[in-house]
Image: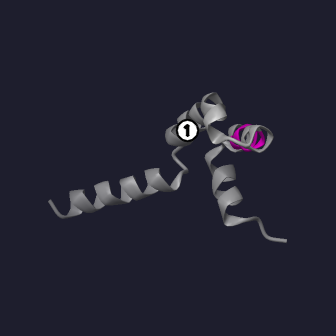
Amino acid sequence: MEDDPYNARIERTGCAQENEVLQLCIYDKKDWRLCKEEMQKFRKCYQSSKNNAGSQALSMSENERKKNP
């Protein structure tokens, strides 16, 4: 069975543990607003990763600007 694309993307960032903690918090508390600390930890990890989709898109757009000033 193939991985869910969402889970595969999270795995590539190295933030799977932070994501799991966040998902469990949301499941347990039934309100994402009660999981702000877990969300911040996941966000910090995800944003610092070079393997997230946002970083790749940003890198590609920067490369395009360098080619076409």
Q: Is residue 35 above or below residue 9?
A: above
On the image, the x and y values in percent for residue 4 come to 73, 65
Amino acid at pointer 1:
Arg
Q: Nearer the viewer, residue 64 or 38?
A: 38
Quadrant in the rendering for residue 21 = top right
Q: Which residue is mark 1?
A: 43
Q: Nearer the viewer, residue 31 or 12?
A: 31
Q: Which residue is the extreme one toward the front?
A: 30
Chain part drawn in magenta = 19-24
Q: Is residue 25 above or below residue 7?
A: above
Main SS class of the magenta portion in the image: helix
On the image, the x and y values in percent for residue 13 come to 61, 47
On the image, the x and y values in percent for residue 44 come to 54, 34
Which residue lies at the image location 70% right of the left edge and 39% below the top edge? Answer: 22
Q: Which residue is the extreme one toward the right?
A: 1
Quadrant in the rendering for residue 5 = bottom right
* Drawn side of residue 60 relative to residue 43, left or right: left
* Drawn side of residue 40 relative to residue 60, left or right: right
Give yes or no for residue 23 being in the magenta stretch: yes
* Drawn side of residue 54 relative to residue 16, left or right: left
Q: Secondary structure at mark 1?
A: helix
